[in-house]
Amino acid sequence: MGAGLLGAGVVDVLGRMRRAQQRHRPDGGLIAIPSGDLLRTERRLRAGNGQLLRDELDAAFGLFQRTFGSRSGPPPEVQGVQIRPDRIELLLAGSLAEDDRVPFPWERSDDPPSLAVEVTHLVHQPTGADGGSSLPKASFPTMVTVGRSPDGPLLVHLEAIGSLGLSGPPSECMGILRATAVELATSRAKNQFDLVLIGVGEELAQFDRVTFETDAATVLHQVHQRRLRGDEVLRSRGLGSFAEARWTGLEGYDPMVVVVGPDVVGDDLIDLVSAACDPRTALSVVAFGEGVGARYTLRVPNSGGTSALEPLGPVVFPQQISNDDQAQLGGLVALARDLRPLTSGDAPYVSLAIPLPDPAGPSQTAVDDISIGLAAPVVEAPLVISDDNLGSGDQRRHHQAVLNDEDGPEPAAGVEVEVAILGPVEVRGAARPFTRAWAKELVVYLAMHPNGATNDGWATALWPDRLMASSSLHSTASVARRALGNARDGRDHLPRAHGRLTLAASVGTDWARFVQLSDANRVSDLRQALELIRGRPFDGLRASDWPILEGIAPAIEASVVDVAGRLAGLYLRQGDPAGAEWAARKGLVVSPYDERLYRMLLRTAETAGNPAGVESVMSELLHLVADDVEPFDSVHPSTMELYRSLTRHRHLASSLR
């Protein structure tokens, strides 16, 4: 099981499921994350450049849409994609007309017919600050990887080719079917097509717009109904296919992809493959068998070696998922669905070297009834706080000023260099700039491992898919040591050592300050702790997976939310809704999906006498859940009941006037 686009899709789904875990986590609890074999499997999925490939493909497809979507008539039909190290090639169904001028930066070729663009000309679509993507609707939602050619990953556009047959050893073909089903089920464009699995991938039916069937007859009935509806729609608009119709802006007829297991045989299978040739169905089928009548065939030789995807070209390594891989993927998904909270004494958190705030501070009990636990009782009559209790105008202006303060308090005494990870990563107080980005990444890694790390450990974290020469590791450490410089006592901030590196005590972190301030449990200290939050933790790291895989990022996220909720509750009890809102918003910077903080914002808006604020907060939450959490979670019943109670209270107050 390779990484690539398949791995990127699975990692995205796991991330979305873990957002739901964080939302259901009780105060002081931690979410379940993998260890052992499951951890090694997730590392494999994250290795490589799958996310980058997806971004490049999306950029190329977006450029194609802008270039050809505005022309009269349908655009060139794209049947597949060849990804090369320096360019993206869209493989066409036929040659372009000789007089068809292709605008820059596209390059045309007639052998084979294709349009190519250099990756240096592609502009990637931005990703939202809260992790959500702002990508437009996909141009080719049913594009899927079949394997690697001698030049790089090869994809086919299932809607364009209609049907793909697999020919070869059943075990090999079954692995290809599994991989196809998983990549489609976890695709970034999954909300734009329906996936039907017959006799393969039953465990994927838990994903959005994925259904599992045991026989082809049921699916054939659905296809027949699609054909009847499709024929009427297309004839009324004078169009030849739904692929063409969507280019004209027609909504409501998304493609259907059917992946058929090897145990499905007979006339029903042949009829299903035949239906995929009809443009009125917007149907594509991937099936096992030589004589099923598929338009394209991937031939897998019995003795290994190069496969042939006729007529697109050779496939050196078909993309497959083995039985063991499938079991590991199932284990990862099951763990990400587990809502039982862990503690800092459970694996893998027990191995963390960084400190964590005390989850049961003395102020916690005092705010539970008003604040943010998932099981918190609903307050039917919110607190009524007068303007006199909200603080002076100077105090309210101070709250706003802190929202824009990114510097925070000064580092702790004795710390001469501070590694800041509570936002874009920074190394403050270094003697000179880092001349190598990886040297700075090494310092960040060591800062989160105050007991030190072996050369193998930090090298694997920074370069998980590469085996680095010892000379490269030595050079990286030397650059880091030179950039950090010497402490006041003349010693290196990064002492020289053989086989293991440890930062000196003169190097601290903003996270250590956060923990120290949080454990003090005074309002002023809790506020100073949250002032350290500048953005999403570890933002900007090139090697961004190790904080997640080691449990560091989930633990920090949970701790910040707990502290933000604690402070918000205290502010609200003091009659300071502006302070409560500030604290909750600081927590949402780190964990944008945490519904407990949204419940705090609802209470805060109501307490401040701001009914429009209540509606605005609820609208914000609904939009966030719909975009980045569903279908694995929805707005929590406690939140809905709180919103209804606040609304009822407002309506009752209005009727009594």
Image (cartoon, rainbow, N blue to C red):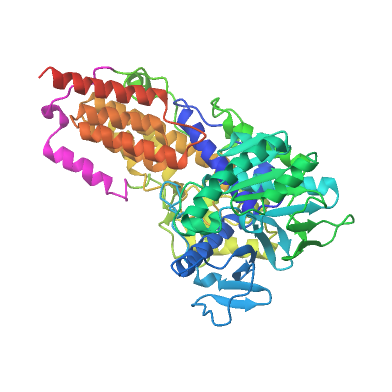
Can residue 519 be seen at all in this image of the molecule? no
Q: Quadrant of the C terminus?
A: top left
What is the quadrant of residue 640 in the picture? top left
Q: Where does the image place residue 554, in percent across and percent down from the top left?
A: 51, 38
- Residue in the picture at 33% in, 47% down: 410
- Report the front residue among 575 and 264: 264
Relative horizontal placement of residue 312, taking residue 282 as reference (left or right):
right
Can residue 596 be seen at all in this image of the molecule? yes
State which region is magenta. 380-409
Height in image: 332 above or below 146? above
Query: Is residue 397 rendered magenta in the image?
Result: yes
Work out which residue is located at the far bottom of the displayed protein and give it.
99
- Residue in the picture at 77% in, 53% down: 293
What is the quadrant of residue 240 in the picture? bottom right
- Report the front residue among 144 and 455: 144
Q: Where does the image place residue 346, in percent across and percent down from the top left?
A: 59, 28
Q: Where does the image place residue 265, in percent across and percent down from the top left?
A: 80, 41
Query: Is residue 408 rendered magenta in the image?
Result: yes
Relative horizontal placement of residue 508, taking residue 316 as reference (left or right):
left
Relative horizontal placement of residue 354, taking residue 372 as reference (left or right):
right
- Residue in the picture at 76% in, 63% down: 310
Height in image: 596 above or below 470? above
Q: How many marks?
A: 0
Work out which residue is located at the far right of the displayed protein and give it.
303
